[in-house]
Amino acid sequence: MNNASEVIGTVSLFLFAAGALLPYLFYRKRQLSLLIGCLAAASGSLMVMYLGFRGLLAPEPIYIRFGNILPGICLELLIDRLSGFFLLTISVIALLTSLYSIQYMSLYSRENLAWWSFCYNSFLLAMVLVVTVNNFLLFLIFWELMTLASYFLVTYSYKRKLVRKAGFVYLIMTHIGTVFIASAFFLMLGVGGGWDFAALASNSTGLLPVVKNLVFICALIGFGTKAGVVPLHIWLPQAHPAAPTNVSALMSGVMLKTAIYGMIRMIIDILGVGPAWWGGLLILLGAISAVSGVIYALMQEDLKRLLAFCSVENIGIILMGLGASLVFYSWSLPVPAAIALAAGLFHVLNHAIFKSLLFLCTGSIYYATHTKKIEQLGGLIKRMPFTAVLFLTGAISISAIPPFNGFASEYQTYLSLLTISYQQTSVLWSLGAILACVTLALTGALAAACFVKAFGISFLALPRSEKAEKAEEVPWSMTLSIAPLAILCLVLGIRPAPLINTLTKVSAQLIDGPEVPPLQVFNSNLALVLGLLILIFIGVTRLFGGYRERKTETWGCGIEHNVKMAYTAESYSQPIRRVYQPLLRPKRKVRTEFSERSYFNYRVYFKEHLGSNLREYLYKPIRKGIINISQKWQVIQSGNINWYLGYIFLTLILLLIFVTKG
Amino acid sequence: MKEIALFLGQGLFILLVSPLVNGVIKKTKARMQNRVGPPLWQPYLDIIKFLRREAVTSVNTSWLTSITPYICLSAYLVAGGIIPLAGKQILALGDIIAFIYLFALARFFLALASLESGGSFGGMGSSREMMIATLVEPVLALGLFGLVALAGTTDLAGIRGAGSNPAGILALIGLMVVIIAETGRVPVDNPDTHLELTMVHEGMLLEYSGRQLGWLHLAAVIKETVLLILLIHLFFPANPSWPLILILISLIVKIMVLGVVLALIESVNAKMRLFRLPELMAGGAAICLLSILINSLNGL
């Protein structure tokens, strides 16, 4: 049986490689090269999906050995339940995105599509390898490959200045992250130990608590940068809108999750039990990310930027589950720890599904209207009925509304956080856990507001621009490749039990706890009763007492109704912007001009700018500080060769003293 | 089978009693203003009248507008149905978290539907409603999860009477503030006016008419009653060993008393400016937090 996995694993890797290289053979035939690239990626993902299933369900890890690719370093894939789960998440999204891209990328038919296929397939290959390699050096190499491939995908439309800038910020931030990840690994590297994860894990038991804490902090910063944890997320809202939308779906839906994988592997699997404040810190960071992510999302008027900020929010929710798990792990409560980790993992999958669903729908909107500005859309529910239903499904799921999947995983996160407060260890912990739940509730309400705005303004009422007026439903190949995601949203929301119980097995394998008893979930009953009641009420309305309905113009208070009467995205979020002013700190400028009769104002200019406060108060001082220090150092670079010779001489003397002392 | 019958019975009970609760509130308000007021059964007549009328909808609307009343009604009814009034949990339908999120479901669809006709008032109501929700939901969560932490379970049967302790009075006050905001009553919103400056909930219903408006009015009174029933379940539960009929009678009496209290609060307060609302909710949150602190210090 293992043999089959080996063959399929090898074939899938070769398919991705072929998808990367073959399109270059047909460089001139753009359509053909795109088709080859997408189909190779899709079939590769299909094989990875098989591997994912095998890994997720197998009690024993699957090993696939390829032999040495570097001197002394063997490329060996280890697919345990955790890797299997992440492979499954990656492959589902990658499969559908690849199918979607065949039609979507025709928007870019004048660009270099072979280059896109190359980056896209390398990106998928790198992600698959990142979550399966068993060796930290290879992990770093593939991590870097993933970053570079995604960098080139982000800067695909490199002719626009904004895109180049976004790519630059992305590259800088992720490399800072990589430095911290590498440091975390090197700190754990024992004397004479191997490079693989098992050796690291056995080394880590002997580490001093200080070193362990340091490793934890490094891993948190390193992976947190990639995941988009506040305050390290600043690259995210720039990079996601810059990339082609199908790539954003993959980056937001899946690539961020590889960082979560890294965190789980590093902290729970390799580092093992730590102090409880690790979990507390994660919950705190998660809460901050969740609220600030969603509140900024609410203020955006570019659909892709809105979704990007929302990813920050969801990463926050995932971190809360993870944090709760770490707390229980450190309190030696393996069963709640496993359940909390399963809640986090469940949200990983759910977020991957609904976020790529929403991104792909945004891609469809862009395909149909060539804009992603909410203010220019409107009335699309009539013009793009299928896309509207799909987007609505995603919007309901991401707002954590029952009976869809977002609710199912946030519900488990709530339960895990509340379980912390049940333990009654101290007032601080129980109060903290309740407050974390309150933040989760606040996040849910804000997310609902955000997506009522996103869906309501762009799909309902009347079209606000000619572009939206002329929109038509996108080709069926696009709608059909999004539809499975919407179905998954509903299915996982109605019947989460099998998945959750599988996920507790994943976490039990990492935590070495006892078997977790199957969890009781009510979602399917709730959905059934809700559905039945709705049907009953529809029936009662339509069947009894002669139902009559008449269509007419909307009442425009005496004048003809027009689109300018409808609410805009800006005005929709205004009350929230005003209430949460202390958090957002918008900059306002109001200038009034008077006419000759100075009692009546003639013209009022109003300007409001909502910048990034982090940039202002955190990144700017840091940047200034670095530049300052560098300028101070310039003193020793006098340009005088005598001085430089002096430095060499001085260094030599110091070294000699050091050697003779030792 | 008995459970299903109980669930259906409870839903039917809530469906039938809610307009009466609304009638009592209206009557009390009228008496406070030295008016005779409409008869207690006026809300029934209003709803029946709406249900018989023809529905006029905007040409801009789609299936979303037509399905929303049913979703609201079902969500509130299920939320009411999962409160185990007579003893143990009825079916496995959900707990306190599901309860909160069923309200979110109804709100989500109503806020969307009110945007559909493309008028200004719908958007205004919708935008304000979502803003108020971002203030109300955290405080609601704070009040409820404080009691959940005390009881050690999110199960609705498990938290029966979780607030029947001295610190519970504080939580009760905090949750009353939340319920006033959630049901759109003075000082947060005024259910009696259609002034553009003040309306929130009414603004969202503005483009509805006929049978669908009737359903939405019914949904609104059910929401009110269900929230009051939740308060009673948390703070003044009946002894579950009593016979069913006694439980129901005591429940009706308690709902009416709470309804009168709500009406009194409404009568002696003026409508607050919309953007003063954060202060009110912060007050509610502070009171809930105090209750949690007292309880957790007590537990140590």
Image (cartoon, rainbow, N blue to C red):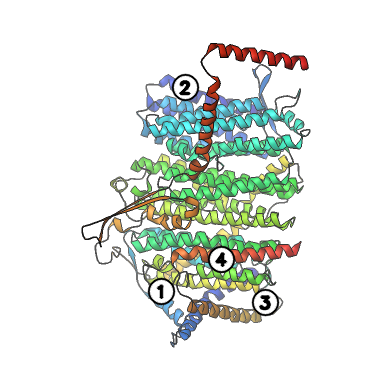
Alpha carbon distance from label 3 to label 4: 30 Å
Q: Give the residue type that dot 2 points to.
A: Leu
Please tell me the numbered disc located at residue A239.
none
Decide: marks 3, 4 in contact (CB < 8 A)?
Answer: no
* As drawn, B1 above or below A497: below
Q: Earlier in the sequence, mark 4 or mark 1?
A: 1
Most foreground residue, A371 or A543: A371
Q: Earlier in the sequence, mark 3 or mark 4?
A: 3
Q: Give the residue type that dot 4 points to.
A: Gly
Alpha carbon distance from label 1 to label 3: 35 Å
User: Which residue is the site of mark 3?
Assistant: B238
For this view, does A73 lie left or right of residue A202? left
Callout 2 secondary element = helix
Please tell me the numbered disc located at residue B51.
1
Q: Earlier in the sequence, mark 1 or mark 3?
A: 1
Q: Nearer the viewer, mark 2 or mark 3?
A: 3
Please tell me the numbered disc located at residue A22.
2
Alpha carbon distance from label 4 to label 1: 40 Å
